[in-house]
Image (cartoon, grey):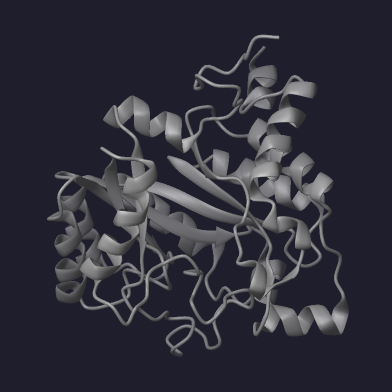
Amino acid sequence: MNNPFLYSDTNKRYHTLDYFYKRNFHSKVLKVSLNAGFTCPNIDGTVGTGGCIYCSSLGSGEYAGNKEKTLLEQFEEVKEMMLKKWPNSKYIGYFQAHTNTYAPLSTLKEMYESILKLPNVIGLAIATRPDAITEECLNYLEELSKRTYLVIELGLQTIHEKTSILINRCHTLECFENMVKKLRKRNINVVVHIINGLPYETESMMIETAKYLNTLDIQGIKIHMLSILKNTKLAILYRQEHFPILSREKYIEITCKQLEQLRPEIVIHRLTGDPKAEDLIEPNWLTKKVTILNDIDKYMLNNNTYQGKRLKEKES
């Protein structure tokens, strides 16, 4: 059976990040995860305390660098490892840990520009919250986007207010949507993070989140499975309430149904979480990342589906 999906030159039936990079930069492009030592307005009391209940002390930066080292030291360490497998690559500096626009503009400029000066760096990916980008910062990001490839990664996780309150996101859906509009008004690329398997969310709720995002002008999405990590508030909640956890098979099914609802041009940056095994409480199947991705491919082939299929059916 031929692959019916246009944005693919492999067996993938969704718009992979690798495909996007090759078509736009004509090279292997690698993201170098960095820890700039930022905090978060949801930790320091500005909008909340304690952070999101699933976040570890590393602020979703488990694979970012060691913040005790300089950004340049972090970058070179990761780059040297990558060079062994992928020589002659280009790089994107990925500011990953905590909230990476949450600092004075002078600090942000110094950090971002130091990475952009490095050889073969073609751009930046900056992970942040929708309530942590000032107008002053937006103006700078707009200028930055005109001279390099720039992606702002916004955490949303869910559109459902009850869940958002439970996981202590401390921002509204309206706040998120307004920031997407502000970024796109300046022609800045937006990638959105969502999490499947959040406590007490149903399959229909997770699919509704994907449907909502498809109505917005976003350029990419990251889909994660909820990781229950040691030493988090989520771990305490799980011990107390034993809320249901998605099975591996159900996660694959829901994720594929979400892909069916997304416009084909939206780039899929991630389709599963990647927690460290020593920190993971549940689900244990998350440590098998490659096999999960392979089984997503098999599901889509066996069900003759692909990214955007449901949208195409509505048009016909």
> In the rendered view, would you say 58 is above or below 172?
below
Q: Position of residue 154 (x, y in %)?
A: 45, 58
Q: Residue 170, percent across and down? A: 55, 76
Count of marks placed on residues = 0
Left or right: 228 in relation to 221? right
Q: Is residue 222 above or below residue 13?
A: below
Between residues 33 and 129, which one lies in front from this camera angle? Answer: 33
Q: Nearer the viewer, residue 56 or 135?
A: 56
In the image, farthest residue toward the front: 84
Q: Is residue 289 left or right of residue 138?
A: right
Against 252, residue 65 (above or below) is below
x 19%, y 72%: residue: 105
Q: Residue at x 14, y 45 (%)?
A: 147
Quarter in which the C terminus is drawn: top right
Q: State the residue in front, 148 or 35.
A: 35
On screen, 202 above or below 269?
A: below
Residue 89, given in percent of the width and then of the height, sits at: 28, 40
Q: Give the quadrant of the N terminus.
A: top right
- In x, y percent, where is residue 43? 48, 85
Q: Is residue 192 visible?
A: yes
- In the image, what residue occupies the spot 22% across and 56% down? 141
Tell me if 224 is positioned left or right of 48 in this view: right
> From where the camera sits, is residue 217 visible?
no
